[in-house]
Every structure is written in C-alpha cells, then in structure tokens.
Image (tube, rainbow, N blue to C red):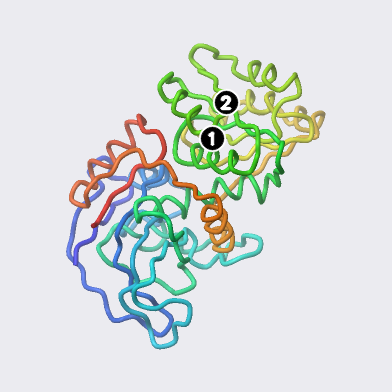
Amino acid sequence: MQAYRVYPGRHPEAIELFERDLPPPAAHEVRVKVRAVSLNYRDLMVTRGSYPVGSDKPLVPTSDGAGEVVAVGAAVTRFRPGDRVISSFFPHWIDGQPTRAKTSGALGAEADGMLAQEVLLPEDALSAMPAHLSFAEAATLPCAGVTAWNSLFVEGALKPGDSVLMLGTGGVSIWALQLAKAAGLRTIITSSSAAKLERARALGASATINYVEQPEWQEEVLRQTGGEGVNLVLEVGGQGTLARSMAATRMGGSIAIIGGVSGFGGEFNPFALITGAKHLSGIFVGSRSMAEDLVRFVEIHAIHPVVDKLFPFEQAVAAYAYLEAAGHFGKVVITLD
C-alpha cells in the first residue's frame, strides 16, 4: 500500500512516496480507502518547517480526506464497510470549546494524515460525508469548510442580513462566500485578479474589490456598507492587512484570523479595538460537531464546493507546487480513484 511522507523543513524536496503496511483495525478503529485528499496552505507550512504545531519527524501529510470504509474494529458502532466518510482535522475535538488535549494529534502535522491509499483512524475522527458530493468535493470540508463555518456562524455568530468580507479567493474564502450566500449574508470579497472576481460574482458575491486597483480597499468596504463597515472580516494572517481589516469592521464587529497566507503579524493598534468595541478571534479550524453541522447545511442547500484543479495521486508533488504558485480559485485536490 502506497503513501506519501513529508520531512518537515526540507521544502521543496520534502515529500516522497513509500510503501507501508497497515495492521487490522483495533477495537475502535476504522480502515478507510482514501478516494480524495484536499490540500491546505498549512500543508505547505509543514513542508517548510514553519507550521507552529507539529513534529520534526517524517509523517504522512495532509488533514483533509474523503473515502470509503473498508473494515471496522470489533467495538465500532458509528460506521460500517461501504460508508462514505470524511476525516476530522483534530481527531480528539468532538465538541465544546477547544483545549490542548482536544487539539492534540492534528492529522498531517502531529500524527499521520490522509495522503495515502488507505488509513486507520479512530471512529470518532470521522464524519459521514454529504450524500450529494463527490469524494473530491467532500475532501474540502475538514479544514477549509469547517474553518469557514466556525468563523461565520460559531465565533462570528452571524445572522441573515449581516455582512462579511473575505480576503482573497483561496479555499477558506470561497467556502465562506458560498456558505454566507446560502445563509442570506451580504458578501464582499477581494482579489488582485479581475477574472477571479468575476467568478466570485458568479458565485453570488454582493460586491468585489480589486486590491491592486484599490490598495486602500478598506475605504471601498466602508463605501459599500454606507460608512458602517462589515460585521465580520475573514483575515488571512495580518501582514499588511490587519490594520485595514480593522478599519473595514463596523463597531462591535469581529475580525477572524483564519490563517497565515499573507504572513503572520502586522501593524496592530489595540486602541482601535477598544474604541470600536471590536473583537479579534483566532480560528483554529473546529470540532467534529461543527463539521457535522456543516454537512447538514451543505446538504440542505445543495452546495457544491469549488474545486480548482484535480491531480492524480502519482502527481501529489505537482499538486503542492500548484498550490504554492497561488493561482488557484477554491481548492486543490489529489484524487485516488
């Protein structure tokens, strides 16, 4: 059985294909034939050795996968062979607030992940995938989909009629656009590409901003919202953007830090939070219960997540390179069909 392993810090020669054997499932384990794996920016950070949580030992990368159950342990009650499932980013975070224990053992960083022909996982680390989705589409839920859901509806607590700003057109931003549109939110999204902004409008974006043509894009956000600002900004790291995101947020609104694509850090003025009664939240993906809420919402609204490009399993290294080039709109997926 083939799998990939990554050597953290050896980018770009960090990933290699190898052969491994899996034992029969233990009492509470499930064996899954992986059919698709979705890449996240975090997977690039692991190859560079820059991800803040992880191991310096080689491990099977990626957190996000979808597949079919092929065998179950004697005590498994949640699944049976033939079920179609998705992985959980955090195998131990089932519900409730995050803790160190719940967020330990993250797939593809601290524990072996999904970039393999078959994997063994605890039954609690899996959810049923939406029935109407392909494996490639379903593989985008565990990190990007759950992060968007948590940002909008758990931490953000948005309701119909509220407004949200997405920075860029990567996986989380496009997931957030689709979820927000279905929930009746006003959506604004930025990009440096006119073609990508056109695609975002086709997905239902209420307004789009080209941040090359309008480098002070926060002013356009304020104009689009009658001077008030948005209820929530999905912030991609903060390097060069956090101050603008804060300015684009309405009084009492929130800025959700969802990743580090733009680089971590940036100019920060705590007084602007105080005088604006604004909230700054770190979004560390989410729990399995959030994933299950997301699955139900996606099924009810018949949402199909945007997959930018598919790569066969044999071309996983090329998929990483494509993601790093940052020309994608939505998700990059590796298939094992």
In this orientation, does residue 58 appear? no
Residue shown at 46% from the left, 32% from the top? 169
Mark 1 packing: few (<14 Cα in 10 Å), some, or many (20+)? many
Please state, as top left, top right, bottom left or bottom right, where the N terminus lies in the image.
bottom left
Q: Quadrant of residue 56?
A: bottom left
Q: Nearer the viewer, residue 182 or 61?
A: 182
- Secondary structure category for the residue under label 2: loop
Q: How many marks?
A: 2
Q: SS at mark 1? A: loop
- Which sits in the foreground, 134 or 245? 134
Residue 11 drawn at (x, y percent):
28, 41
How much space separates mark 2 and mark 1, taking CA atoms? 8 Å
Q: Is residue 248 left or right of residue 274?
A: left
Give percent across and percent down for residue 189: 55, 28
Disc 1 target residue:
237
Residue indicated by mark 2: 241
User: Looking at the rendering, which quadrant does residue 193 occupy?
Assistant: top left
Residue 173 locus on image (x, y percent): 51, 37
Is 187 left, or right, of 134 in this rendering?
A: right
For badge 1, the amino acid type reads Gly
Q: Residue at x 71, y 34 (%)?
A: 231
Figure quadrant of the C terminus: bottom left
Q: x, y (%) of residue 40?
A: 40, 45
**Front one among 270 and 117:** 117
301 to 262, vertically: above or below = below
Per the rendering, the mark at residue 222 is none
Amino acid type, residue under disc 2 in the picture: Thr
Q: Is residue 226 above or below residue 282?
A: above
x 27%, y 42%: residue: 319
Dot 2 surroundings within 10 Å: few (below 14), some, or many (20 or more)?
many
Circles 2 and 1, Cβ within 8 Å, touching? The answer is: yes
Q: Is residue 307 visible?
A: yes
